[in-house]
Protein backbone atom coordinates (compact mmCIF):
# COMPACT_ATOMS: atom_id res chain seq x y z
CA UNK A 1 0.00 0.00 0.00
CA UNK A 2 1.66 3.25 -1.14
CA UNK A 3 1.60 6.51 0.82
CA UNK A 4 -1.34 8.02 -1.09
CA UNK A 5 -3.51 4.93 -0.65
CA UNK A 6 -2.61 4.71 3.06
CA UNK A 7 -3.45 8.39 3.49
CA UNK A 8 -6.87 8.05 1.79
CA UNK A 9 -7.53 4.94 3.87
CA UNK A 10 -6.91 6.94 7.05
CA UNK A 11 -9.20 9.75 5.89
CA UNK A 12 -11.98 7.29 5.04
CA UNK A 13 -11.82 5.73 8.51
CA UNK A 14 -12.09 9.12 10.14
CA UNK A 15 -15.06 10.08 7.99
CA UNK A 16 -16.96 6.99 9.11
CA UNK A 17 -15.93 7.18 12.78
CA UNK A 18 -16.26 10.94 13.09
CA UNK A 19 -12.53 11.39 13.82
CA UNK A 20 -12.84 9.89 17.34
CA UNK A 21 -10.92 11.50 20.16
CA UNK A 22 -7.62 9.84 20.90
CA UNK A 23 -7.55 7.97 17.61
CA UNK A 24 -4.13 7.51 16.08
CA UNK A 25 -5.52 8.10 12.59
CA UNK A 26 -6.91 11.45 13.71
CA UNK A 27 -3.30 12.71 13.69
CA UNK A 28 -3.17 12.10 9.94
CA UNK A 29 -6.62 13.60 9.44
CA UNK A 30 -5.82 16.72 11.45
CA UNK A 31 -2.46 17.18 9.71
CA UNK A 32 -3.70 16.99 6.14
CA UNK A 33 -7.43 17.70 6.14
CA UNK A 34 -8.66 19.65 9.18
CA UNK A 35 -9.06 23.36 8.63
CA UNK A 36 -11.24 26.06 10.08
CA UNK A 37 -14.79 25.26 9.07
CA UNK A 38 -17.17 28.01 8.02
CA UNK A 39 -20.47 26.96 9.55
CA UNK A 40 -23.57 27.46 7.40
CA UNK A 41 -27.26 27.51 8.23
CA UNK A 42 -29.07 24.27 7.45
CA UNK A 43 -25.85 22.23 7.43
CA UNK A 44 -24.96 19.47 9.88
CA UNK A 45 -21.76 19.13 11.90
CA UNK A 46 -20.17 16.60 14.23
CA UNK A 47 -18.93 18.58 17.25
CA UNK A 48 -16.82 17.15 20.05
CA UNK A 49 -14.42 18.08 22.83
CA UNK A 50 -12.88 16.59 25.95
CA UNK A 51 -11.46 17.66 29.27
CA UNK A 52 -8.05 19.31 29.41
CA UNK A 53 -5.36 16.67 29.96
CA UNK A 54 -8.14 14.12 29.33
CA UNK A 55 -9.54 14.91 32.80
CA UNK A 56 -13.17 14.11 33.70
CA UNK A 57 -15.63 16.91 32.95
CA UNK A 58 -18.50 15.08 34.69
CA UNK A 59 -17.85 13.80 38.20
CA UNK A 60 -21.39 12.62 38.93
CA UNK A 61 -24.87 12.43 37.45
CA UNK A 62 -25.66 15.92 38.75
CA UNK A 63 -22.89 17.33 36.56
CA UNK A 64 -24.43 15.64 33.53
CA UNK A 65 -27.85 17.02 34.43
CA UNK A 66 -26.37 20.51 34.70
CA UNK A 67 -24.61 20.18 31.33
CA UNK A 68 -27.80 18.92 29.70
CA UNK A 69 -29.71 21.84 31.22
CA UNK A 70 -27.04 24.13 29.76
CA UNK A 71 -27.54 22.49 26.35
CA UNK A 72 -31.18 23.58 26.55
CA UNK A 73 -30.96 27.01 28.15
CA UNK A 74 -27.93 28.45 26.34
CA UNK A 75 -29.36 27.43 22.97
CA UNK A 76 -31.23 30.66 22.37
CA UNK A 77 -30.57 33.73 20.24
CA UNK A 78 -30.79 36.27 23.07
CA UNK A 79 -28.21 35.57 25.83
CA UNK A 80 -29.69 34.50 29.17
CA UNK A 81 -26.78 35.68 31.32
CA UNK A 82 -26.58 32.56 33.49
CA UNK A 83 -28.75 29.59 34.37
CA UNK A 84 -29.23 31.09 37.85
CA UNK A 85 -30.48 34.36 36.36
CA UNK A 86 -32.63 32.47 33.89
CA UNK A 87 -34.35 30.62 36.73
CA UNK A 88 -36.10 33.88 37.63
CA UNK A 89 -37.55 34.36 34.13
CA UNK A 90 -41.21 33.40 33.95
CA UNK A 91 -41.95 30.49 31.64
CA UNK A 92 -44.35 32.56 29.55
CA UNK A 93 -41.50 34.95 28.76
CA UNK A 94 -39.05 32.30 27.63
CA UNK A 95 -40.57 32.29 24.14
CA UNK A 96 -39.73 35.98 23.78
CA UNK A 97 -36.04 35.07 23.61
CA UNK A 98 -36.67 34.14 19.96
CA UNK A 99 -35.02 31.39 17.95
CA UNK A 100 -32.68 28.56 18.79
CA UNK A 101 -29.10 28.87 17.66
CA UNK A 102 -28.79 25.18 16.74
CA UNK A 103 -30.83 22.01 16.48
CA UNK A 104 -29.52 18.89 18.21
CA UNK A 105 -29.72 15.79 16.04
CA UNK A 106 -27.99 13.52 18.59
CA UNK A 107 -25.61 13.73 21.53
CA UNK A 108 -23.56 11.67 23.96
CA UNK A 109 -22.00 12.83 27.22
CA UNK A 110 -19.20 10.61 28.54
CA UNK A 111 -17.16 11.16 31.67
CA UNK A 112 -14.31 13.04 29.98
CA UNK A 113 -15.77 14.13 26.62
CA UNK A 114 -18.90 14.84 24.64
CA UNK A 115 -20.17 14.41 21.08
CA UNK A 116 -22.95 16.35 19.33
CA UNK A 117 -24.50 16.36 15.89
CA UNK A 118 -25.73 19.92 15.39
CA UNK A 119 -27.63 21.69 12.64
CA UNK A 120 -26.87 25.40 12.52
CA UNK A 121 -30.08 27.45 12.57
CA UNK A 122 -28.84 31.06 12.84
CA UNK A 123 -25.72 32.78 11.54
CA UNK A 124 -22.75 31.90 13.80
CA UNK A 125 -25.17 29.82 15.85
CA UNK A 126 -22.79 26.92 16.53
CA UNK A 127 -19.95 29.12 17.69
CA UNK A 128 -22.20 31.31 19.87
CA UNK A 129 -23.88 28.31 21.45
CA UNK A 130 -20.68 26.39 22.20
CA UNK A 131 -18.98 29.48 23.61
CA UNK A 132 -21.87 30.02 26.03
CA UNK A 133 -22.09 26.32 26.87
CA UNK A 134 -18.37 25.98 27.56
CA UNK A 135 -18.08 29.18 29.57
CA UNK A 136 -21.21 28.60 31.61
CA UNK A 137 -20.47 24.98 32.46
CA UNK A 138 -16.82 25.71 33.29
CA UNK A 139 -17.90 28.41 35.79
CA UNK A 140 -20.34 25.95 37.39
CA UNK A 141 -17.76 23.14 37.54
CA UNK A 142 -14.97 25.35 38.90
CA UNK A 143 -17.20 26.88 41.59
CA UNK A 144 -18.48 23.47 42.63
CA UNK A 145 -15.01 21.92 42.85
CA UNK A 146 -13.06 24.97 44.07
CA UNK A 147 -10.76 24.99 41.06
CA UNK A 148 -9.77 27.53 38.44
CA UNK A 149 -8.61 27.55 34.85
CA UNK A 150 -9.70 25.80 31.67
CA UNK A 151 -11.86 22.71 31.83
CA UNK A 152 -11.99 21.80 28.14
CA UNK A 153 -9.07 20.98 25.86
CA UNK A 154 -8.98 24.16 23.77
CA UNK A 155 -11.58 24.98 21.15
CA UNK A 156 -14.18 22.40 20.22
CA UNK A 157 -13.44 20.13 17.26
CA UNK A 158 -15.76 19.91 14.28
CA UNK A 159 -16.38 17.97 11.10
CA UNK A 160 -18.84 18.94 8.35
CA UNK A 161 -21.33 16.16 7.67
CA UNK A 162 -21.43 16.52 3.92
CA UNK A 163 -23.42 13.48 2.85
CA UNK A 164 -26.49 11.57 3.95
CA UNK A 165 -24.50 8.35 4.38
CA UNK A 166 -22.08 10.18 6.64
CA UNK A 167 -25.00 11.57 8.68
CA UNK A 168 -26.50 8.11 9.25
CA UNK A 169 -23.20 6.54 10.34
CA UNK A 170 -22.24 9.45 12.59
CA UNK A 171 -25.68 9.33 14.23
CA UNK A 172 -24.95 5.72 15.17
CA UNK A 173 -21.45 6.64 16.36
CA UNK A 174 -22.73 9.47 18.56
CA UNK A 175 -25.83 7.71 19.91
CA UNK A 176 -23.77 4.66 20.88
CA UNK A 177 -20.55 6.44 21.77
CA UNK A 178 -20.54 5.09 25.32
CA UNK A 179 -20.47 1.59 23.84
CA UNK A 180 -17.68 2.59 21.46
CA UNK A 181 -15.66 3.34 24.61
CA UNK A 182 -17.16 0.34 26.46
CA UNK A 183 -18.77 2.45 29.20
CA UNK A 184 -21.54 0.48 30.90
CA UNK A 185 -22.07 2.62 34.00
CA UNK A 186 -25.18 4.78 33.40
CA UNK A 187 -23.82 7.34 35.85
CA UNK A 188 -20.86 7.96 33.52
CA UNK A 189 -22.80 8.51 30.28
CA UNK A 190 -25.92 10.24 29.00
CA UNK A 191 -27.05 10.10 25.39
CA UNK A 192 -29.93 10.32 22.91
CA UNK A 193 -30.06 6.58 22.13
CA UNK A 194 -33.28 5.88 24.06
CA UNK A 195 -34.93 8.81 22.34
CA UNK A 196 -34.05 7.29 18.95
CA UNK A 197 -35.29 3.77 19.70
CA UNK A 198 -38.53 4.79 21.37
CA UNK A 199 -37.57 4.07 24.98
CA UNK A 200 -37.91 7.73 25.97
CA UNK A 201 -40.69 10.22 25.28
CA UNK A 202 -38.16 13.04 25.27
CA UNK A 203 -38.17 15.12 22.07
CA UNK A 204 -34.98 17.06 22.67
CA UNK A 205 -33.40 15.98 19.38
CA UNK A 206 -34.45 16.73 15.83
CA UNK A 207 -34.13 13.09 14.92
CA UNK A 208 -36.69 12.76 12.11
CA UNK A 209 -34.06 13.52 9.46
CA UNK A 210 -32.45 10.21 10.45
CA UNK A 211 -35.39 8.11 11.64
CA UNK A 212 -37.63 8.81 8.64
CA UNK A 213 -35.12 7.04 6.39
CA UNK A 214 -35.96 3.71 8.05
CA UNK A 215 -39.14 1.66 7.99
CA UNK A 216 -39.39 1.71 11.77
CA UNK A 217 -37.37 2.29 14.93
CA UNK A 218 -36.27 -1.35 15.04
CA UNK A 219 -34.69 -1.04 11.59
CA UNK A 220 -32.71 2.02 12.73
CA UNK A 221 -31.64 0.18 15.88
CA UNK A 222 -30.35 -2.73 13.81
CA UNK A 223 -28.53 -0.35 11.47
CA UNK A 224 -26.88 1.51 14.35
CA UNK A 225 -25.82 -1.62 16.20
CA UNK A 226 -24.36 -3.11 13.02
CA UNK A 227 -22.50 0.14 12.45
CA UNK A 228 -21.16 -0.16 15.99
CA UNK A 229 -19.74 -3.59 15.17
CA UNK A 230 -17.90 -2.10 12.17
CA UNK A 231 -16.64 0.83 14.27
CA UNK A 232 -15.27 -1.45 16.99
CA UNK A 233 -13.61 -3.66 14.36
CA UNK A 234 -11.91 -0.64 12.79
CA UNK A 235 -10.75 0.58 16.19
CA UNK A 236 -9.25 -2.83 16.87
CA UNK A 237 -7.53 -2.81 13.47
CA UNK A 238 -6.14 0.64 14.26
CA UNK A 239 -4.74 -0.63 17.54
CA UNK A 240 -3.05 -3.55 15.79
CA UNK A 241 -1.51 -1.22 13.18
CA UNK A 242 -0.27 1.10 15.91
CA UNK A 243 1.27 -1.81 17.83
CA UNK A 244 3.06 -2.98 14.69
CA UNK A 245 4.50 0.50 14.15
CA UNK A 246 5.72 0.62 17.76
CA UNK A 247 7.38 -2.77 17.40
Image (spheres, grey):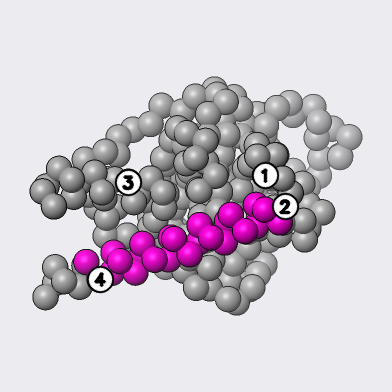
Point out the stretch of residues depicted in magenta: 217-241
Label at residue 217: 2
Dots 2, 1 in contact, CB < 8 A? yes
Residue at (28, 64) in percent of width and height? 238
Secondary structure beneath dot 4 equals helix
Measured as percent of width and height from the top left, residue 245 is found at 14, 68
Q: Judge left or right: residue 218 versus residue 158.
A: right
Q: Secondary structure at mark 2?
A: helix
- Alpha-carbon span between mark 4 and mark 1: 35 Å
**Residue 74 lies in quadrant:** top right
Element on which disc 1 rests: loop
Labels 4 and 3 touching (C-beta < 8 A)? no
Q: Earlier in the sequence, mark 4 or mark 2?
A: 2
Residue 223 belongs to magenta span: yes
Quick one: label 3 or label 1, which is nearer the N terminus? 3
Residue position marked by numbered label 1 in the rendering:
214
The residue singled out by tag 4 in the image is 240
Q: Residue 186: percent from the left, percent from the top?
A: 64, 73
Residue 24 picture quarter: bottom left
Q: CA distance from mark 3 to mark 2?
A: 28 Å
Q: Position of residue 23 (x, y in %)?
A: 32, 60
- Residue displayed at 39% across by 56% down: 20
**Residue for badge 3:** 12
Amino acid sequence: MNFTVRFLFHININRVLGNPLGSSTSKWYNLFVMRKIKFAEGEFYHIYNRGVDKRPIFLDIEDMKRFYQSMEEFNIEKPIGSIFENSFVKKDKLGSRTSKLVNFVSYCLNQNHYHFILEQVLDNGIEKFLQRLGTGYTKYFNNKNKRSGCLFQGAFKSSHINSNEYLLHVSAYVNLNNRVHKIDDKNLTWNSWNEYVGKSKNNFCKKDIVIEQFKNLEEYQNFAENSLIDILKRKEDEKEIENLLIE
